[in-house]
Amino acid sequence: MLIPVILSGGAGSRLWPVSREGHPKPFMKLLDGQSLLEKTYRRAASMPGIHTENGKPKVLTVTNRDYYFISKDELEKADINGSFLLEPCSRNTAPAIAMAAHQIAHEFGPDALMLVLAADHLISDDMAFAKAVTSAQTLASAPHNLLVTFGISPSGPETGFGYIEAGVKIDQGMRVNAFVEKPSLDIAQGYIAAGNYYWNSGMFCFSAGRFLEQLELCEPKVAEAAAACWIAIQAVKSKASSMLEIPESLFNAIPDISVDYAVMEKSTEVAVVPGNFGWSDIGSWSAIRDLVSSDENNNRSLSDTIFVKTKNTFVQSEDRLVATVGVSDLMIIDTKDALLVADPACAQDVKTVVNLLKQKDHDSYKLHLTVSRPWGTYTVLEDHPGFKIKRIEVKPGGKLSLQMHHHRSEHWIVVKGRAHIVNGEQNIVLDANQSTYIPAGHKHRLENPTDTDLVMIEVQCGPYLGEDDIVRFEDTYGRT
């Protein structure tokens, strides 16, 4: 029995301004319109030996509670079953995998195999990856019972990845001699020449029980704190729940440490399965650029672009024409509210921009102008002192919380669909080209009762228009 475990988190700061804290890298859409997370779900569902539930493959996702609803949407697009473990904060991969191991051991037994995948990696050859997973299952099962990692056959002396030194052959894999940090160029060239070094992919396969055993042996503080979290979850969880929230105070007590440092580098029971299946961790804009075909001057574009006397330039723009004249060696990433212009040689330094934005408490490190919510999305069209204009889209059956604002009034104009609205003591129905006014201090609620999208324009007026000026009284999505 194989249970894929999808680790979905991280800010993806090297892919700003498209990836942001409120909408990180796993939710970025690629050329075919699928997000990295949806692609990961589809890949996981196609693996050999995967457990099914009601005729559909089942996966377990570990993610931040803020990403639950958007992750659930991506799961539904992939048409598979899934459950969720929701972290109150980020504590790195060792605690996340430990919590997943406890859930899988509890539900399926300690011998159930976990296939741990990152939500933001890309694999172009799923068949070759499935073959590697089959080899990993053999090594992770009895009689070997090993912790298995996937090594990527290096295409060159890459200095941006960690390396795995492979030892003696065992079945269709090899024992691991050592994990090596990101090397200098000359050391990486030596690894390539040696022939027994592989890039560390950050993907794993092992039984839940074996991982918890090795965690206890290698990093007992993490094991003890994770076990305490799981006991607390068991005390309150519903048997039928497909979503479990990890208690914040107990989860904060788990040391913040990666699974490589906590277990894989310390355990003597580790094997590597090498592979060449078109893996990329999409760790920078250079990786996105390399997915796009180039013209005769090595220019690449994901948008409406005019290149004049331009070489070695990559452009991605959300909705504007971009023209370049007489430039070379640039990356231009344009979104509705932020523009990045960078030298490809400095692609890894984009995270410094994000750190500076955080220091300034600038909204653009965290949110796009379009923000996802459990009920749909809102897009800020205009934002000025005293007024803000939004486009609100509510999914079929979506319902906003019953709420109130202290500092702003709101005008709602329906432009598409039908809205059921609570406005103070009134319950009203509005169709396209109809509107209502909600004074400050009025309880109000918006609902889409139909099977088509509801689109509205909202005009906010008042001395303070921050998103934190909200008091929720009732909420379908548990946010009160």
Image: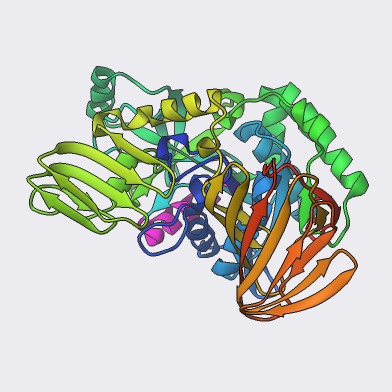
Which residue is found at the position 32% from the left and 55% from the top?
Answer: 320
Q: Can residue 138 be seen in this view?
A: no
Q: Which colour scheme is used?
A: rainbow
Q: Is residue 224 magenta?
A: no
Rendering quarter of residue 253:
top right
Residue 99 lies, in percent from the top left, at: 72, 40
Q: Can residue 184 be seen in this view?
A: yes
Rendering quarter of residue 339:
top left
Viewer-proximal residue among 380 and 324: 380
Viewer-proximal residue among 298 and 148: 298
Q: Magenta stretch: give its range.
A: 124-140
Viewer-proximal residue among 371 and 390: 390
Whether residue 181 is situated above or below residue 314 in the rendered picture: above
Residue 284 lies, in percent from the top left, at: 36, 38
Q: Does the magenta stretch include residue 126?
A: yes
Which residue is found at the position 41% from the left and 51% from the top?
Answer: 122
Residue 268 lies, in percent from the top left, at: 56, 26
Which residue is found at the position 79% from the left and 27% from the top?
Answer: 224
Residue 456 lies, in percent from the top left, at: 62, 68
Viewer-proximal residue among 370 and 387: 387
Q: The N terminus lies in which quarter of the figure?
A: bottom right
Per the picture, the main secondary structure of the magenta-coloured stretch is helix
Q: How many labels does the image show?
A: 0
